[in-house]
Image: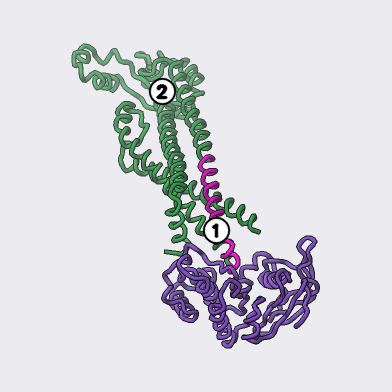
């Protein structure tokens, strides 16, 4: 599903990635681990085409995403559900609107929105809070909003960048349970984390990166 | 209501002062634009009136034979510089005089038809041709004297009136256009600045939307709707204000100018004229909203990249 072939990326003098190669198959749950600044987020940003590598190839469903034109980037992103460490929710919109905006972006028929939004909110346990604003929610709930928004579009892959980074263990555990459940339904998940407890509790394939190089795969 | 319209309305509600500024400036622009448009129309109507009404009267000699008169009439009819040719007999001239002095019957009783000469009244297609045509007609054997429409006095007076009117019409046309253009530019700049401020305030939202795969058109839509709300409100307020003022002054203006049709006397035509102005202004306003929001959004999106 995703293939990195000798991907390198520098930001000025800093080498973020050096000849990184790996493959993630459909339905896999893969952790990207490593200390802060090791290159985990850069990998996720490259998959999203937020960052363009200096060299190498990145194949997503056999298409080299480093070669796609700018106007096709939105279409690429519409196939990916992204969960951010800082949630990235729209503060002036309710929980329900935050989720349905992803459907609006995809130009899904408005008649379908309520049903799909309700389904994912039920899945992440936020049905009761659907009319609340982000300022009224806890960190864990905000992360579940972010997850619901990623799931509602039924993406091919879920990219999660430190989704438990800002959460206490109990809340992080809840989020992980959800990701497990989603993965069991066949969704591919790539998750960047340095949460040792999670790696121990929820065992999956690990790609360990240090100084922009893969140390263990 | 679409998600974009809803977002735009919420944005307007959230910053009422910015919305007020944008609507105020556009209202002012379109109020003046509507006002100037009517002034330009009125001056054109006045100019047209003086240029096209019968201006030249060739008074015929009493001794002129009927065959000479009909020969001269046919000759003038064939002349492409001349239009609206009309023969006025002695009797018709007397009737005209009687109508004109209806409020003082003594004046009409004292005259008899013989003192009024028969005449040929006509206008020229372009006023510049008048003096040449007059000189030619004066040489005709059947013609006694040639003059301009009585109430305008001499040839020089008519030329003066028309050239003064032309000057006024041009001042209104070009001066008004320049004024409206300057105001239009100010509105455009204010609108673009406000939309840019809005975009900067929505920077996070734009970034999130972009990350979840929103196309630039999706990001642009609520901003464009917001600009449309400002401009359409501005056009409507400006147009209604101008319409009310003209509606109030039109009867007096029409009465004052008498037979010069500076404004349509028929209410339907009057409304039609304002409707055309409104449609033109909506078109201009939408173009302004589209360009303003496009520039603002592109500037902010470029900065985000």
> Element under label 1?
helix
Q: Residue at x 53, y 67 (%)?
A: A89
Which of the pair B38/B232 is nearer the observer?
Answer: B232
Q: Which residues are magenta?
A: B185-213
Q: Work out which quarter of the rendered image holds the N terminus of chain B and state it.
A: bottom left
B187 is higher (above) or lower (below) than A23: above
Q: How far apart are the alpha carbons under marks 2 and 1?
A: 60 Å
Q: Is residue A107 visible?
A: no
Q: Residues within 10 Å of mark 1 (few under 14, many from 20)?
A: many
The colour of chain A is purple
Task: Tell me, yes or no, whether the highlighted magenta stretch contains residue B162.
Answer: no
Magenta stretch prevailing secondary structure: helix
State the residue at coordinates (24%, 14%).
B112
Q: Residue at x 45, y 51 (%)?
A: B15
Residue hosting label 2? B55
Q: Position of residue B231 (x, y in %)?
A: 46, 48
**Residue underneath mark 1:** B220
Chain corresponding to green in the figure: B
Near mark 2 (Cα within 10 A), the count class, few <14, some 14-19 or many ≥20, is: many
Q: Which of label 2 and label 1 is nearer to you?
A: 1
- Does residue B207 belong to the magenta stretch? yes
Question: Which circle marks residue B123 in the picture?
Answer: none
Q: Position of residue B30 (x, y in %)?
A: 44, 41
């Amino acid at each position: 599903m995703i293939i990195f072939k000798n991907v390198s990326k520098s930001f000025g003098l800093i080498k973020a990635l050096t000849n990184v190669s790996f493959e993630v198959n459909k339905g896999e749950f893969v952790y990207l681990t490593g200390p802060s600044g090791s290159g985990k987020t850069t990998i996720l940003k490259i998959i999203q085409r937020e960052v363009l590598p200096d060299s190498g190839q990145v194949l997503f469903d056999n298409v080299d995403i480093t070669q796609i034109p700018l106007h096709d980037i939105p279409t690429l992103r519409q196939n990916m559900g992204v969960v951010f460490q800082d949630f990235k929710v729209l503060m002036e919109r309710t929980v329900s609107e935050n989720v349905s905006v992803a459907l609006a972006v995809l130009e899904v028929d408005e008649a379908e929105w309520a049903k799909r939004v309700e389904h994912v909110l039920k899945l992440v346990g936020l049905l009761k809070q659907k009319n609340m604003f982000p300022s009224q929610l806890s960190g864990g709930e905000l992360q579940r909003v972010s997850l619901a928004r990623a799931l509602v579009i039924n993406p091919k892959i879920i990219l999660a960048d430190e989704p438990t980074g800002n959460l206490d263990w109990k809340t992080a555990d809840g989020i992980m349970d959800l990701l497990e459940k989603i993965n069991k339904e066949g969704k591919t998940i790539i998750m960047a984390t340095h949460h040792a407890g999670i790696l121990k509790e929820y065992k999956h394939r690990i790609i360990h990166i240090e100084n922009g190089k893969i140390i263990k795969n | 209501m679409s998600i974009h319209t809803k977002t735009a309305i919420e944005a307007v509600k959230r910053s009422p002062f910015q919305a007020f500024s944008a609507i105020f400036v556009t209202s002012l622009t379109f109020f003046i634009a509507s006002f100037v448009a009517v002034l330009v129309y009125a001056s054109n109507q006045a100019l047209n009136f003086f240029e096209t009404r019968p201006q030249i009267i060739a008074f015929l000699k009493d001794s002129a034979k009927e065959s000479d008169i009909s020969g001269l009439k046919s000759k003038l009819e064939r002349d492409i510089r001349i239009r609206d040719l009309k023969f006025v007999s002695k009797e018709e001239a007397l009737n005209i005089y009687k109508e004109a002095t209806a409020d003082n019957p003594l004046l009409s009783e004292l005259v008899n038809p013989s003192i009024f000469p028969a005449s040929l009244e006509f206008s020229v297609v372009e006023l510049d041709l008048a003096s040449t045509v007059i000189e030619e007609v004066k040489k005709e054997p059947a013609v006694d004297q040639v003059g301009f429409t009585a109430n305008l006095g001499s040839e020089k007076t008519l030329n003066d009136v028309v050239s003064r009117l032309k000057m006024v019409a041009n001042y209104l046309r070009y001066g008004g256009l320049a004024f409206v253009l300057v105001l239009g530019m100010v509105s455009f700049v204010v609108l673009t600045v406000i939309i840019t401020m809005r975009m900067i305030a929505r920077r996070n939202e734009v970034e999130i939307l972009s990350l979840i795969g929103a196309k630039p058109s999706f990001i642009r839509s609520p901003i464009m709707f917001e600009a449309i709300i400002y401009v359409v409100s501005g056009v409507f307020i400006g147009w209604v204000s101008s319409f009310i003022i003209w509606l109030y002054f039109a009867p007096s203006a029409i009465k004052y100018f008498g037979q010069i049709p500076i404004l349509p006397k028929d209410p339907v035509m009057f409304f039609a004229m304002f409707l055309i102005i409104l449609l033109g202004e909506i078109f201009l306003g939408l173009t302004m909203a589209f360009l303003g929001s496009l520039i603002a959004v592109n500037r902010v999106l470029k900065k985000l990249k």
